[in-house]
Image (cartoon, rainbow, N blue to C red):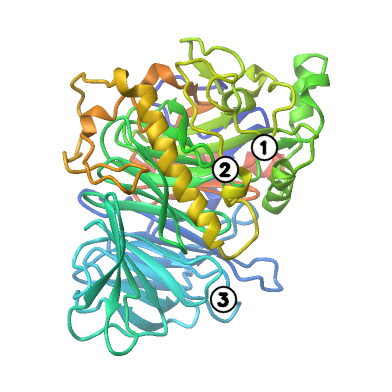
């Protein structure tokens, strides 16, 4: 695990940390907050959220930042590592009465220097469409709370659309809206469109088209977050019942599911190529799930409390196209080989696409992702080839994610190979059936519409996969009494959408839905640092920095290695302790 010099106490707030890329450093001048810089009393308030958009203006300073603190919503020019934040001049500021903003999302497709569309969800269930540049409020959805009265937990524009957006509520429902349509003056009536195990999708019955276009009911309890796959074709949802459910968005088919170790799942994200999903939640773990294999491939333990945000870092995800089996040299040479700098996200996506191609040339990849939690800690993780493609029996010892400990993948292993049971994996690590390439849509592809046959193939595979897993684990049902958090006995999910029998959540532990801890690799964080006084609620990876935020309303910028001149560090050093003392 990487270490940092100068730390005297475990509870000391860290202002820098070191990884294989170099030194990350907190930039006090680039801290954003309310103009008075007074810490916000976050007791009982909704989580702070941060949204970014680039307006592509000619000034070269097109980044904009939106964040909510209590009843307030702020919109600033984000200067990042380049210049100090000017908190005295927000572009827009709004204070709400009777309700609080809970989440927000920019439409990156329509954003210009003159106008930007920002969706804001609220604690009372409404969704507002505003333009913080023009300082206009164009529309208010669910104004009378006839559609849903519960808190909005997540709101996002549908990828590639200028008008469609999806809203999740703590009721466990999601709604698809169109900004061009209005909401009715009476409660909507619904007609069943599709139903599966623990989910149902309804259309709105009305003479004229009105919002919502669709209503999704998913699992039991709150739907805490959802995330679209990079190509926009799949939707990953995490709920308070502890389940991850992945749907085909267009065909409304369930692709796969996973169960937390215990408690609710709070956050979810996709890898840049759409091959892996990471979740975090009330079990204090980060869990890595394979989209292609529909199985847990690793868990990470580093947090001491609930994990509130997980995110992949596309700028540090490493793709090495040379054959790793041919390398010989010192550890320093190995590190230099893997370190190729911080490629732009589209460059990483391009390299990951090559990994998915039919080229027989071996490609080595290391995925970087991060997590923040209510323990006020930031953890960074490396997901390496030895975890993605294990080729030797798994020992009970923990697996470090440090690249220096990564072993080479088996000869011939690449992005196209899916290991089958009994092939190269011992019994403690069962894999699902091989996924036929003709029957699955690669989440990293650029096709915008899913073929019906592909959706059918995914559904058939999911059903077969479940039966195969049930047979392998029939005699191994785990019956110990574990705390299952908020999980209801009615809360369950399977890949088989035909059977109506409910799964007892207590029996999912020790199955493919929720493997035992000793049955999958246990990752240790590359770094794990206490970086705030209050619980952390934001983690965003940008090209030249990492952005974090805590519940006190302080949005912090961490410069990536080599992104800020050394003399700028020296000028800022004097202010670090003063600002940290102000937060106490």
Circle 1 is placed at which residue position?
415
- Pointer 3: residues within 10 angstroms few (<14), some, or many (20+)? some
Does residue 326 appear left or right of residue 529 in this picture? right
Q: Position of residue 405 (x, y in %)?
A: 63, 17
Q: Position of residue 10 (x, y in %)?
A: 40, 21
Image quadrant where residue 48 sits: bottom left
Mark 2 secondary-structure assignment: loop
Mark 3 secondary-structure assignment: loop
Mark 1 to mark 3 CA distance (whole Å)? 34 Å
Circle 2 is placed at which residue position?
275
Q: Are marks 1 and 3 in contact (CB under 8 Å)?
A: no
Q: At x 42% / y 46%, what residue is drawn?
A: 268
Quadrant the C terminus occupies: top left
Does residue 545 appear left or right of residue 208 in this picture? right
Mark 2 to mark 3 CA distance (whole Å)? 28 Å
Image quadrant where residue 328 sits: top right
Q: At x 47% / y 23%, what residue is drawn?
A: 430
- Pointer 2: residues within 10 angstroms few (<14), some, or many (20+)? many
- In the rendered structure, which disc, 2 or 3, sits on the residue that comes first in sequence? 3
Determine if residue 556 is in view: no
Q: Position of residue 187 (x, y in %)?
A: 18, 78
Determine if residue 329 is in view: yes
Image quadrant where residue 401 sits: top right
Q: Nearer the viewer, residue 144 or 480?
A: 480
Circle 3 is placed at which residue position?
110
- Pointer 1: residues within 10 angstroms few (<14), some, or many (20+)? many
Q: Is residue 275 above or below residue 301?
A: below
């Amino acid at each position: 695990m990487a270490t940092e010099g100068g730390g005297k106490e475990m509870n000391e707030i860290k202002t820098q940390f070191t990884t294989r890329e170099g030194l990350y450093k907190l930039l006090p001048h680039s801290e954003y907050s309310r103009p008075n810089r007074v810490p916000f009393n976050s007791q009982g308030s909704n989580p702070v959220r941060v949204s970014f958009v680039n307006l592509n203006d000619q000034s070269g300073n097109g980044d904009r930042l939106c964040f909510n603190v209590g009843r307030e919503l702020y919109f600033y020019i984000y200067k990042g590592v380049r210049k100090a934040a000017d908190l005295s001049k927000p572009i827009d500021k709004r204070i709400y009465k009777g309700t609080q903003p809970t989440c927000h999302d920019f439409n990156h497709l329509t954003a210009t220097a003159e106008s930007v569309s920002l969706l804001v969800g609220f604690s009372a269930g409404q969704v507002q469409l505003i333009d913080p540049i023009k300082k206009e409020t164009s529309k208010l959805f669910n104004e009378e709370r006839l559609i849903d009265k519960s808190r909005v937990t997540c709101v996002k524009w549908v990828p590639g659309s200028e008008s469609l957006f999806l809203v999740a509520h703590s009721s466990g429902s999601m709604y698809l809206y169109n900004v061009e349509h209005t909401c009715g003056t009476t409660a909507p009536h619904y007609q069943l469109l599709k139903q599966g195990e623990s989910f149902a999708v309804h259309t709105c019955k009305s003479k004229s088209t009105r919002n919502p276009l669709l209503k999704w009911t998913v699992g039991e309890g709150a739907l805490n977050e959802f995330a679209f796959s990079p190509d926009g074709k799949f939707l990953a949802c995490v709920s308070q019942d502890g389940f991850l459910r992945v749907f085909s968005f267009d065909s409304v088919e369930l692709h796969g599911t996973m169960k937390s170790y215990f408690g609710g799942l709070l956050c979810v994200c996709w890898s840049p190529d759409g091959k892996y999903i990471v979740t975090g939640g009330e079990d204090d773990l980060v869990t890595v799930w394979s989209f292609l294999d529909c199985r847990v491939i690793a868990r990470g333990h580093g947090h001491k409390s609930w994990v509130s945000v997980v995110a992949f870092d596309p700028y540090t995800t490493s793709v090495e196209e040379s054959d790793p089996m041919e390398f010989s040299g010192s550890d320093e040479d190995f590190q230099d080989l893997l370190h190729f700098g911080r490629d732009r996200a589209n460059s990483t996506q391009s390299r990951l696409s090559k990994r998915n191609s039919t080229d027989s040339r071996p490609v080595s990849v290391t995925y970087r992702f991060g997590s923040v939690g209510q323990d006020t800690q930031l953890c960074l993780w490396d997901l390496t080839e030895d975890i993605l493609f294990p080729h030797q029996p798994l020992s009970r010892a923990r697996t470090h994610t440090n690249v220096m400990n990564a072993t080479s993948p088996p000869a011939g292993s690449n992005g196209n190979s899916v290991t089958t049971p009994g092939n190269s994996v011992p019994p403690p690590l069962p894999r699902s059936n091989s996924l036929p390439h003709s029957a699955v849509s690669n989440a990293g592809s650029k096709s915008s519409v899913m073929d019906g046959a592909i959706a059918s193939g995914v559904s058939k595979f999911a059903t077969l996969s479940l039966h195969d897993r049930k047979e392998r684990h029939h005699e191994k049902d785990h019956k110990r009494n574990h705390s299952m958090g908020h999980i209801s006995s009615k809360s369950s999910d399977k890949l088989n959408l035909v059977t109506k029998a409910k799964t007892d959540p207590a029996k999912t532990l020790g199955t493919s839905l929720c493997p035992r801890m000793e049955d999958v690799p246990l990752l240790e964080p590359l770094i794990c640092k206490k970086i705030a006084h209050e619980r952390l609620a934001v983690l965003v990876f940008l090209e030249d920095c990492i952005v974090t935020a805590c519940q006190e309303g302080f949005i912090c910028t961490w410069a990536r290695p080599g992104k800020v001149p050394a003399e700028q560090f020296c000028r800022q050093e004097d202010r670090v302790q003063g600002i940290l003392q102000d937060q106490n």
